[in-house]
Amino acid sequence: MSTSDDLRHLLLERETALQTEEVRRSESLLRDLLAADFREFGRSGRAYTLEDAVTFLSGETGSEDQTPKTGIADFQIARLSETIALATYRGSRESKDGILYTNRSSIWRLDPDGRWRMVFHQGTPTE
């Protein structure tokens, strides 16, 4: 397996983890995946910092049985430098109104501690 395949697999795992209840409800797990200078432009158009994201995600309600099903399709990465990568994909999420599709992009950075952390994320609604 090539280095780019390894990185693609790793970043797909980390993107997928961010969609799980376990991670979304855990401040420590979120801080392991998101950089201290994290920023997001959400699907809703709202802008978030790391602190906003931790507060918002930890406040989500619902039980494991009510967790919306999510999906990632067409996952691709582009290495922008040795320590920066762009991930793009088409996300899906069940809602009371049906399935919502979103074009998503994330910028990941290899931090000095050797961990890849997301520094930027954007979700754009699509049909």
Image (cartoon, rainbow, N blue to C red):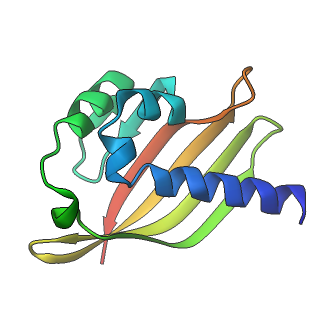
Task: Name the side, left or right, on which 1 lies relative to 90.
Answer: right
Farthest residue to the right: give it: 2
Q: Residue furthest left?
A: 96
Residue depicted at x 22% and y 50% = 44
Using the image as rendered, state which of residue 33 and residue 104 is in the foreground: 33
Of 26 and 78, nearer the camera is: 26
Q: x and y percent of residue 95 in the render?
A: 16, 70
Q: Quadrant of the C terminus?
A: bottom left
* Residue 5 drawn at (x, y percent): 80, 63
Judge by depth and name the residue closer to the eye, 89 or 116.
116
**The N terminus appears in which quarter of the rendering?**
bottom right
State the image coordinates of residue 93 (x, y, percent, origin top left).
29, 69
Number of marks: 0
Q: Judge left or right: residue 3 versus residue 74.
A: right
On screen, residue 110 above or below 80: above
73, above or below 25, in the image: below
Q: Quadrant of residue 59?
A: top left
